[in-house]
Amino acid sequence: MLHNFFQRSYVIYLDIYRLDQDLLKGLHVSKGSDHTNDIKIKHLLNQTSGLPDNFEPLMDNLLTDPDFSITPREAIEWVKRNKEPHFPPGSSLKYTDTNYHLLGLVIEKLTRLPFHEALKQYIYKPLDMKHSSMLHYSEPIEPCSFPIADFYIRGTRLNDVEAYGRLDYAGGGVVATTEDLLKFMKALVLHQLVSEETLKTMMADENRFTIGINYGYGIWHLKPVPLLMPKRYACWGVAGITGAFMFYHPEIDTYFIGSFNDFSYKRKFLQFMGRAIDKLR
């Protein structure tokens, strides 16, 4: 089913999945033009929808209000009321967790399961990821003997802040051991999660994210840049706002997986992987 979802659905318009019409109404209105019906699934996947971000603005509320709580739907409604879209769908790239909130709701509609249960049924169980879960949503298939590592933002420990897990939703929030993440990456590289054709599409339909990094369908692609990014560092994977990273280097057939567990270290992985690559070559 996961193969079919990616192969057949990433070019379909968002409204085809019949999400709550009140939620979609006026979702992308800019300068008097409503582009909501122009949003495709692929625009959410490759961060080109133009929708504004809900995560970082609402994070400020979470850190200042101990009673703060919000659902994924409410987070989308909030951003619709309070933020302006950046550009028409498909015309540029702007990373926003609003895209992932919508994708999570689409997956729930398709699978008829809560998002965390869909992860368990279609990813954790088939790949034997027994110690993976979603923070404050679910428990792992089997208990893990190791505690969840502490992670912070601006000196605040977020492990026990339930509202953080709820806000993160499909934008992240996965708790997993390094071993489980390695199983995931190997399955992706070996086309056990999606077909070879689909993976090529995910990587080829990309846009410039920042210097030396292009962004495809959820995939960060480190690309050579003269003087700044030598060819030997070319690899692909994903990085998270907590300093987490999960990359594959095809030339040396090596996986780089870890986390610095702090929002202020979200770019630290680049330096770390660069040094590790130099050691291994």
Image (tube, rainbow, N blue to C red):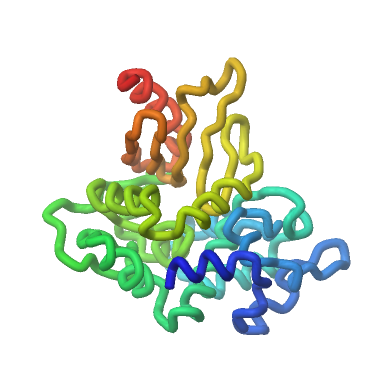
Q: How many marks?
A: 0
Q: Is residue 65 visible?
A: no
The one of 165 and 116 positioned closer to us in this rendering: 116
Query: Is 255 left, or right, of 147 in this rendering?
Result: right
Q: Position of residue 66 (x, y in %)?
A: 42, 63
Q: Position of residue 71 (x, y in %)?
A: 49, 73
Q: Position of residue 28 (x, y in %)?
A: 74, 67
Determine the image quadrant of residue 224.
Answer: top right
Q: Quadrant of the C terminus?
A: top left
- The residue at the point 46 percent across, 26 percent down is 233
Q: Is residue 167 visible?
A: yes
- The residue at the point 25 percent across, 46 percent down is 178
- The residue at the point 53 percent across, 74 percent down is 106
Q: Work out which residue is located at the far right of the displayed protein and give it.
A: 32
The one of 19 and 206 positioned closer to us in this rendering: 206
- The residue at the point 52 percent across, 57 percent down is 198
